[in-house]
Amino acid sequence: MKPNLFQYVRAKSTKDAVSLLEELGEDTQILAGGQSLVPTMALRMANPETLIDISAIAELQIIELSNGVLTIGAGCRYVDILNRDLVVKSAPLLCQAIPYIAHDAIRNRGTIGGSLALADPASELPACMLALNAVIIVESNDGQRKISALDFFQGTYFTALSENELLVAVEIPEIGSNQIHEFHEISRRSGDYAISGGAFVLTLEDSLITCAQLAYFAVSDCAVLATNAAEALEGVSLSPETIISVSDIVAGEIEFFADLYNSEATKKQVTKVLTRRMLTKIYDGIG
Ligand SMILES: Cc1cc2nc3c(=O)[nH]c(=O)nc-3n(C[C@H](O)[C@H](O)[C@H](O)COP(=O)(O)OP(=O)(O)OC[C@H]3O[C@@H](n4cnc5c(N)ncnc54)[C@H](O)[C@@H]3O)c2cc1C
């Protein structure tokens, strides 16, 4: 099938893009990498009147570190982020996560902004943003707003982004020398969307965990933090017993949603196994 007829505009700058969004109104969509939007248009599940292409906006391509904060522009493609030394050093979780996203062809075009604005509950990057305590920067004609990742993801394909706003960048605190990042997902085949996935950041003082951010994706209506399990980890050292009890807490606290292929019970069991594997890997690494 082919998409309905649509108008195409290429924005020259962020200011230009937000003015166009305001001017053209609600039947307008941003075109970033097109890896989700174009297939849905081809299936006529999305029928925008106008597309605003943001792929040529240089301001949206920045990756920079300043005062302990890594800023990544919304227009950065997965492949640009993965290969950047600054990201490897400051937010290694992203470099662990990106190879799990689809295949090379999609990673060559898809953008971080597109992934976060779309907020697919099975996407890897929203969970990474939760685990990393990221802040999402959005812009309209009225100026910029900064939204914590926790407040940004609100449901399936549903975020705090308004229709007249463009997601322009994310800010990620640089990894501390006392922090450990871990990412893993379980899927049927490599490149498939996960059955369950996790993005963890643990802060340690000697061997004691002082803070835990355990984020999950592909398990609920959007990326979620397991806060009870995190609390159970705080103030303790990892041990085989803790790992089992924390995995049980995670399975008990998340509200699991089935997908097309996996029941809630499968998601719950797979998440338990995933958590055990991830914490065991961290435990083996510390020991
Ligand atoms: C076969 C296949 C497998 C895939 N597997 C995975 C996977 O395993 N994991 C995963 O995470 N993703 C997967 N994807 C989706 C892929 O990662 C997309 O690239 C991503 O979800 C959207 O990024 P994009 O830049 O292509 O955005 P687009 O498709 O261009 O846009 C997506 C939506 O976000 C809006 N948007 C885009 N950028 C902005 C912005 N800056 N501000 C406001 N709104 C914006 C658009 O208007 C549109 O509604 C897969 C896609 C395909 C086709």
Image: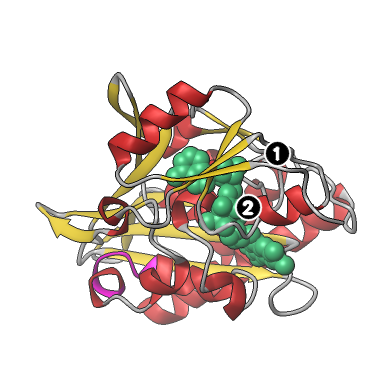
**What residue sits right under mark 1 in the picture?**
221
Q: Is residue 194 left or right of residue 117?
A: right
Residue at point 41% right, 40% down?
167
Q: Nearer the viewer, residue 182 or 68?
A: 68
Q: Nearer the viewer, residue 236 or 201?
A: 201
- Give residue 101's position: percent from left, percent from top: 59, 69
- Give residue 98's position: percent from left, percent from top: 50, 70
Mark 2 to mark 1 CA distance (whole Å): 9 Å
Residue at point 77% right, 49% down?
3
Label 1: element kind: loop
Is residue 90 inside the magenta stretch?
Answer: yes
Residue at point 43% right, 39% down?
149
Is residue 34 inside the magenta stretch?
Answer: no
Q: Amino acid at mark 2?
A: Phe
Query: Is 68 above or below relative to 257?
Result: below
- Give residue 116's position: percent from left, percent from top: 51, 47
Q: Quadrant location of the N terminus?
A: bottom right
**What residue sits right under mark 2 in the picture?**
217
* Residue stretch in magenta: 88-93
